[in-house]
Image (spheres, rainbow, N blue to C red):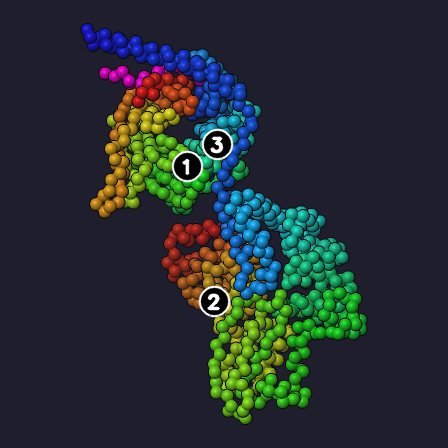
Amino acid sequence: MDSEDTPQIITHIEHNINHCLFDCKWIPCSAKFVVIGSLPKGSGTLEIFEINSGELKKIKEIERPNSFKCGTFGASSDIERRLATGDFKGTLEIWDLEKSSQVYITKEHTDIINSIDGMGGNSLNCGAPEIVTGSRDGTVKVWDPRQRGKPVANMQPVQGETRRDCWTVAFGNSFNDAERIVIAGYDNGDLKMFDLRTMSLRWECNLKNGVCYTEFDRKDIPMNKLVATTLEGKFHVFDLRTQNPSKGFAQVLDNSSKSGTIWVARHVPQNRDIFITCAGNGQVSLWKYEYPEKRCHLDSQGVAVGVPGKLKRLQRMMISSQPINSLEWNRDHLGLSIATSYDQYVRVLVTTKLNLQ
Amino acid sequence: MDKAFEIQKHARDNVKTLQTYLTDLQNWEIEMKRKEAALNDEFVQDLPPVRSKARKEKPVQVKNKPEKRITGLDYSAWDKFDVNKACEEVDMADLGPVSLDSKKSQAAKTEKLKEEAQYEKERGNNFVKQEKWDEAISCYNRAIELVKDDAIYYANRGLCYLKKDSLHQAETDCTEALRLDPTYVKALQRRATARERLGSLRAASHDLAAVLAIEPHNAAARRQLEAIRARMGTKGAKSKSSPLSTPTVESKPVLPPKSSKIVELPAEPVKKELTPLEKWLNGVGENITVIRPVKKPPHLRSKRALKHVTIHEIPLGTNKTDDKPPTRMKIIEVNDNASHGDTNNNNANNKIVDTIPSCDGDKIKIGDNVKAGDNGKIGTSTNYTVQNMVPPVNSVQFMSEWKYLKGNDRARSDYLSIIEPTKLPSIFENALESDVLSELLYTLCNNKEKFRNKISAYLKAICKVKRFSALAMFLTNSDKNLLNDMLSHCKAVENLTDSEIADLINKYEL
């Protein structure tokens, strides 16, 4: 039975859009959000909605010939609020949504951009504004909106090796101007951590199933935790504070929910130990990571080894009949989130009592 | 009962929380809309540089520091050194790095300008290849506007003017280029051509003489000089050369330039009655060879590294030598690419060790060398062995030696083999031309056993030369055949892995 403090997940608004949806993002400093999708004829759409006393109001729609796949506001300041998008043809575009025009366009990827992440737009002393894209062509590229046409870093398999489909990318560890890490998950279960300061592969491991989504609990602190979700209903949480030369990072695996692919895992911006996972059966689950008493201990050789914590499920809720393919928490309002799903609905979700956890 | 009541209470609580949450949400909506409207663009971010640029700035700073340092031996510089100012600077640096910042950006700016100018130059060069002189000139104009102190842009524009028969402009451009870089051979040759066609033969011949002083093996310059001399002869010119670049001054005493001195050397010495001192200086009647200091102005001196010459002490006095110093080997500097300097030293060495012939033989040797240089053919190069060669440190040295060894594959391969493969990129910088590349490949391919297990190292090093990707595009079919041949050799003999081979194939665009 639920205790008093158990959070509730409630679908606040449900809005049907008659085409396929891939991603949704809050427009910073506003009650508006962008929904990224594609029409049956193969063209891409960016739609802007505003929450208006319990209703969704469509403000603007942009249609382009190529389907969009993903988007981020991360590399843009709250004033400019420029959306970076990746599409099915491998084009990276940055949009001025006010004017409905692109301010940056480049096509260096040869296939669909599956995942995009941005950072540095707002946070001071946390490095340059940069965008990272991961594509089916097997490359991960890092872009700076101030440098036209060419990526500032490009991570690809050495020639002759098979190019794995990169499904997810994310920034992290960007706690000063120099440090920054890109994490990339691939369809064969590879998880690779690239250090952008030293331009080297810092760590890699294989999670056995294709990695669908990965996120650091915070981007702008020395890396603390990482969640990576995979096919077959599993997800891993890594403690990144202690890297053992032989064993790598301590991890805890959850495969308790038989819910199919876990498409997304997102940390609550106001509480980095709570995150939500969105599964292929339309269920969302709220998790809390509980730290062990000591996060690292010394092994027999005197080398530090990380100690994994425990995962506690706070709540779960079936909100859709189809996989939920994206979810984003609102930065400014605790417990407010939007999610898109393959049942062609965009939902505004409300989670209560998060402040009590 | 209690339980049912509890559940009911719980549900009611939940609804209540949700209700308050939704009111909060409503308030938040209104708040956000107000906030959003208040947003304006007065927001300047202090962002760190783009990743790729960030790395570039560091080396610039590092480079600046050693330049400032004055060596302990440089007394004149210390005389100029303003102690008070330096102290002030140190104080300022403690206060804050304000001045440093501006300097940094200044350096970045000039760097950018240079890049831009280099781009214009590349475009200009392309136009030159297509013989579109006017377009090329406008490109060089822009490059010169951006960077005023690069001799190359002037010299190239000079060439375009030359092709367009704007001879006066060509001459001014070349003069400007030479002001910036007095040893710029191409500019000298172009000015000579311009002057020749303008009719100032003496000035032209002087330029050519200067060319020959820098590059004694430059056959084209030599031919041109001879042609001009012939013309001057028919016109009845009085003196063959004047030391001054201006053709108007004739009354000054003439010092024959270097090249003519070389030419006249063999005829000079024999008949004259020598004073004892001169005899002693020339080492007449002794089993030794006298090595003379080579006098050259600093800017004409060899840029090649000084060569180590082992001096063998030998007991003198087998002849009637009493009051002579025990050894008179004086080596000031190993002469540039001038064959006589080099071979002379080595001949001398050999002869002293072997204690063979008299100085007469030696003289003949000198004569031979000069003759060889005269014809522009390399007669002596067959004797040219690895010991005589010095690895180059820049492309100018390499090219002069390489040209000098033209037609002698064995010597060329010897020369190439003494160059450390890893040094190739730093030697060539961005001055590797496609014809030279072809010759390099040819030499490598035809001397596989000489380079033994090093061919792959050379091939890899060549890939690292700047602008190599552009050169790779111009590889001819025969070059590619050579490369394929070498790669299969590398695979078979040097045990290169498949991925390395694939990488090379990719780089060479095979």
**Residue at the top extreme of this rendering:** B1
**Is residue B90 within the magenta segment?**
no
In which image quadrant can residue A56 be found? top left
Q: Position of residue A28 (x, y in %)?
A: 47, 24
Q: Is residue B411 visible?
A: no
Q: Which residue is nearer to you in this view: A42 or A98?
A: A98
Check disc 2 and report the residue beneath it: B418
Q: Is residue A287 visible?
A: yes
For residue A59, the mark is none
**B262 to B73, vertically: above or below:** below
The residue located at (50%, 57%) in the rendering is: B425
In which image quadrant can residue A307 be found? top left
Check disc 1 and report the residue beneath it: A174
Q: Nearer the viewer, mark 2 or mark 1?
A: 1
User: What secondary structure is marked by label 2?
Assistant: helix
Q: Nearer the viewer, mark 3 or mark 2?
A: 3
Amino acid type for the residue under numbered disc 2: Ile
The residue located at (37%, 12%) in the rendering is: B20
Q: Position of residue B74 (x, y in %)?
A: 57, 64
Q: Position of residue B189 (x, y in %)?
A: 68, 63
Q: Earlier in the sequence, mark 1 or mark 3?
A: 3
Q: Residues within 10 Å of mark 1 (few under 14, many from 20)?
A: many
Name the side, left or right, on which B221 lies relative to A112: right
Check disc 3 and report the residue beneath it: A121
**Residue at the left extreme of this rendering:** B1
Q: Residues within 10 Å of mark 3 (few under 14, many from 20)?
A: many
- Which residues lie in the magenta part? A1-17
